[in-house]
Amino acid sequence: MQHLFKLILLFFTIGAGTMIIAQDDQPDNAQSIPENAPEAAPGQDMTVQRLSELLHQLDENLVENGANWQFEFRGRVLMVVADGNADRMRIMSPVTGSADLDQAEMYRLLQANFDSALDARYAVAQDILWSVFIHPLSPLRERQLASAIAQVYNTAATFGTVYSSGEFTYGGGDSNSELREELEKELERLLSPRT
């Protein structure tokens, strides 16, 4: 476990410098984003600074290193890496060492990526299995951020059981709607403007 944590810290420290920017394969109207979600007014695009402000609301012990943040949500470590110049961001959480995965488990992860992980994904990097969400930075809205954090958390937490982001299952299933709604409400409350 200590080896895994060292790899996590190494990945977190150098993450922004080594992040490969890939095209987002999610449609603009992905299932986790309600069709009636309000659009931000012009000039209110998500920025690295705004993302930092929102993340600071989630965890008073948040660790920030430039455009990299590490925080804890419900006992699980999550990391956010943003690149304003490339207009990309990602949220990720380590799940387990990739050496611990056998062929059947890897096959199951690919199945989950198709039907139950949805906007979050299982991915392998630096010999670690991650739960990860990748998205353009500027169009990201606070509600999407809350949904993304919940999905990354759920996908990591349900590894080995239902392998689900807590969102709808492709094909019409909705087995985790209560968990998803509870997490999103908590995250929306934490991300709401404070007076």
Image (spheres, rainbow, N blue to C red):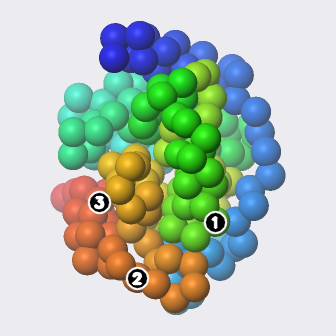
Q: Which residue is mark 3?
A: 187
Residue type of the residue flagged with mark 3: Leu
Q: Which residue is mark 2?
A: 174
Local packing at callout 1 (Cα closer than 10 Å; few below 14, some 14-19, many 20+) is few
Horizontal arrangement in the rendering, residue 47 relative to residue 166 (left or right): right
Q: Secondary structure at mark 2?
A: loop
Q: Which residue is mark 1?
A: 114
Q: CA distance from mark 1 to mark 2?
A: 15 Å
Residue 28, position in %: x, y? 69, 73
Do labels 3 and 1 touch, CB within 8 Å?
Answer: no
Local packing at callout 2 (Cα closer than 10 Å; few below 14, some 14-19, many 20+) is some
Q: Secondary structure at mark 1?
A: helix
Q: Is residue 99 visible?
A: yes
Viewer-proximal residue among 191 and 152: 152
Quadrant location, the C terminus: bottom left
Residue type of the residue flagged with mark 2: Asp
Residue type of the residue flagged with mark 1: Phe
Q: Secondary structure at mark 3?
A: helix
Q: Earlier in the sequence, mark 3 or mark 1?
A: 1
Residue 42 to residue 57: above or below: below
